[in-house]
Amino acid sequence: MDVHKYCYSAIDLTRQDGPHRRETLESNDQMLRLGGNMAGPQALRLGLSTLLAEEFINHQTAESLSGIVIHTDHSTTIAKGLVDGYIDVACIFENQAIDEKIEELIINERNDPLVWVRANKFVLSPGAPIPILTWPGDDWMIRTLAKRGIHYNIVFNSPDYHAKLAAVKAGIGLSAIPKRIVPSELVIAREYYLPDLPPIKSLLCARLGLETEKAASLIKQLSTLFFDPSNSQ
């Protein structure tokens, strides 16, 4: 059985106006349906940042995912689903846009070093603005560059993390990701013109009152996989 069939994507729930309102309602409906419509106990609903999904899936089998449904999206969307009761357990990255109510749901956290990444063939012309690849709400690079007064251009913006990685691999600019998940096809950029990036905090959260054996087992696995310092690269 292909474990990837358990992964779902949803539209950003934070968009609340104009033509996006219908998409928001559809996304809410999708989150409410997580777990399917089969009789019996409801599946455990796991929310993952898209940055962490591949690493998690690589450690799973169809058997280990029995009784679990995975929802992957931006951390802000996953956090909203957790606060609203549509997600049971979540692994996300801290973001200024996340509702402060998430704080009471945090059960583990860790600072992850952020690094610049580029393609092997990428070269910046002298004096040119730094071309960066972002996604909606991404301020990891922008905040640092603006603080240092460094000129930059956003040359690619997509809600799709893997599309962004593909663009970086094509050599059209630089991006930033946690050091421990840098793909082998990319290079950690250490050019003199790139400022050091602050670490980003990863969060393990769980819905209040979640006291099942399945949830405890999943939380233990997530803690070992993403929050054990010995797993740092």
Image: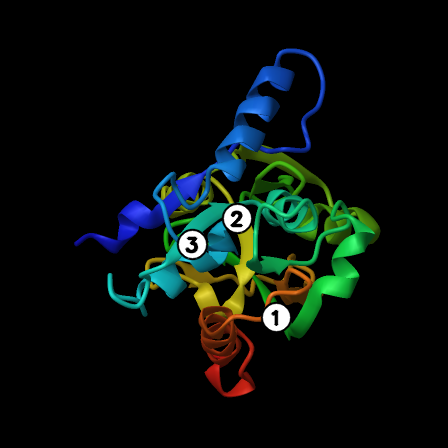
Which quadrant of the figure has residue 166?
Answer: top left
- Of all residues, the one furthest to the left in this rendering is 1
Going by the numbered disc 3, the residue's amino acid type is: Ala
Q: Residue drawn 52% across and 70% down?
A: 212
Residue 171 in view here? no
For disc 3, the marked residue is: 43
Which quadrant of the figure has residue 128?
Answer: top right
Task: Give coordinates of residue 32: x percent, y percent.
Answer: 53, 37
Residue 49 in view here? yes
Task: Give coordinates of residue 213: x percent, y percent.
Answer: 47, 74
Going by the numbered disc 2, the residue's amino acid type is: Leu
Q: How many marks?
A: 3
Contact? badges 2 and 1 (CB < 8 Å):
no
Mark before the other along the chain sequence, 1 or 3: 3
Quick one: label 1, few (<14), some, or many (20+) residues within 10 Å? some
Task: Give coordinates of residue 127: x percent, y percent.
Answer: 65, 43
**In front of the other: label 3 or label 2?**
3
For disc 1, the marked residue is: 113
Please tell me the numbered disc located at residue 174.
Answer: 2
